[in-house]
Image: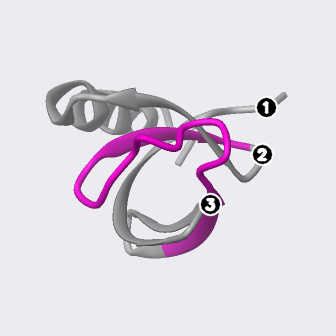
Amino acid sequence: MCLGVPMKIVEVKGDSALCEFSGSKREVSLKLLPEAKVGDYVIVHAGFAIQKLDEKDALETLKMLQEAGII
């Protein structure tokens, strides 16, 4: 099973970004979402940012994933 996880962009370098989620940071490709910027929440799947989310939706999704024991 694959899961897209909401992450917050903390740094952008060209067509990649450093994203943070629950204290972990990952390098993520912005090739599918080049308009994303620092401070945006994005759904990350297979190393790519695939969709922007507003902060409320991102935090709600993260809370549900934590409550379900998935993350």
First in sequence, mark 3 or 1: give its number.
1
First in sequence, mark 3 or 2: give its number.
3
Q: Is residue 7 left or right of residue 27?
A: left
Quadrant of the rendered image containing residue 16:
bottom right
Amino acid at dot 2 = Ala
Label 1 vs label 2: CA separation?
Answer: 8 Å
Q: Is residue 21 magenta?
A: no
In front of the other: label 3 or label 2? 3
Helix, strand or loop at mark 3: strand
Above or below for 26 versus 38: below
Residue 49 vs residue 62, the one in the foreground: 49
Residue that badge 1 annotates: 2
Q: How is the image coloured?
A: one colour
Label 3 vs label 1: CA separation?
Answer: 16 Å
Residue that badge 3 annotates: 28
- Residue at image position (36%, 38%) is 62
In magenta, the rendered stretch is 25-45
**Residue 67 location (% of width, % of height):** 37, 35
Residue that badge 2 annotates: 46
> Do the residues bearing badges 1 and 2 touch, measured as CB atoms within 8 Å?
yes
Residue 11 vs residue 65, the one in the foreground: 11
- Residue at image position (37%, 60%) is 9
Q: Is residue 1 left or right of residue 47?
A: right
Above or below for 12 versus 37: below
- Residue at image position (55%, 69%) is 14
Above or below for 36 versus 26: above
Amino acid at dot 1 = Cys
Helix, strand or loop at mark 2: loop
Helix, strand or loop at mark 1: loop
First in sequence, mark 1 or 2: give its number.
1
